[in-house]
Structure formats: structure tokens, C-alpha cells
Amino acid sequence: MGSTEPAWLLAARRLLGTREAAGAANNGTILGWAKLLGLKVLGIAYNADSVPWCGLFVAHCLKAAGIDLSNMKVAVRAKAWATWGANLGASVLAPGAILVFDREGGGHVAFYVGEDATHYHVLGGNQGDKVSIMRLAKGRCIARRWPRGVPVLGRPVYLSASGVPVSGNEA
């Protein structure tokens, strides 16, 4: 973690380990993010942490860093992030980039923290039902985004694959 990381990635790092509640219960912290963001940003009424919350997590961290989300229509849907902000090429990724992935039955969105030869290392919500860092196959990535009008800080970060779990389905 370096001082050049954008504020939204620092906000995300502070939430590492936040978990869904087991069973029918709900984590009040996660539901609190939804309440603060509201229907206009989320696009749906969000009332249970059993509903996929990776997009909610990304929106919460960006909003906490003062990023304008007024153009986001359905933040809770991972693939909605594929057209938000500005496009970022794979060769100019920097920590905090928003990566959108395809998965069976939907998508996933998380923040870039680095990469190895075959996988992106991403910090995201709803990864193993918690906020965590996992590896997702580069071939699943369908979009790389950055908040429009915000300078890109940093450059690609190459990491070892050792010890970081691979995720196959973030549902």
C-alpha cells in the first residue's frame, strides 16, 4: 500500500474483512452503505446482504472519496460499471482502477491492486462473502475504468501469485 493510491482504494482497504451476516441476518454496515447511497445511485432498493453487493461496495468506496456518482444509473449491478467513467487500457492500469468481470449468471466489479501473468489481483466486496483480495483470470475482464476527470496515479503493479486465492465465481 503506497501513498500514491487513490482515496477510494484506501477507503476499500480499510474495509478488508467486512463480511455478510450468516443466514437470513444482514450486516448493518453493508446495509448502511446502501442507505447512504440511495435509490438514485443504486438503481434498486437494496435491503439484504444476500443480494450481490460488489457494485454497492465499489460505489460506497468511490462516494467516500468524494467521487461524483450522479451519472451512475444502477451501481449495484456489476456490469453497469463497464460504461461508467473513462476507459483505461490494460497497459496503463494503476491501483484503484475499476475492473469489471464476466461470470456465469452476471458480472463482478472490484478494484485493481496488481496482477501476475494470468490474473488480476482485485480488492472487492462479495468475494467469498466478504471484502477481500482475490485473483481473477484476466480473460474474464470485460472493462477497465477510471473516474472521469481524475488523473491516473501509478502504473501496473506486478505481484506474485503465491498465497492469493483464485476466484471462479463471485455470486
Image (cartoon, grey):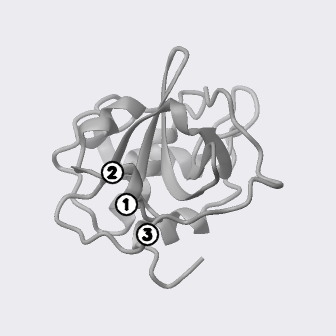
Q: Is residue 129 left or right of residue 54?
A: right
Tell me the CA gap for discs 3 and 2. Answer: 11 Å
Q: Which residue is mark 3?
A: 155
Identify residue type, mark 3. Arg
**Residue 77 seen by the camera:** no
Callout 3–callout 2 Cβ contact below 8 Å: no
- Quadrant assignment, res 153: bottom left
Placement of 38 over or under 152, stated as above or below: above
Residue receiving disc 2? 89
Outermost residue to the right: 163
x 27%, y 42%: residue: 41
Q: Position of residue 65 (x, y in %)?
A: 36, 69
Q: Estimate how packed mark 2 is, as few (under 14), some (14 to 19) or many (20 or more) residues with alpha carbons within 10 Å.
A: few
Question: Dot 1 corresponds to which residue?
Answer: 92
- How many neighbours does mark 1 have within 10 angstroms: few (below 14), some (14-19), or many (20 or more)? few
Work out whether residue 169 or residue 87 is closer to the camera in this orientation and state it.
Answer: 87
Residue drawn 23% across the image and 50% down it = 85
Left or right of 142: which side holds 28? right
Helix, strand or loop at mark 1: helix
Q: Are marks 2 and 1 in contact (CB under 8 Å)?
A: yes
Mark 1 to mark 3 CA distance (whole Å): 6 Å
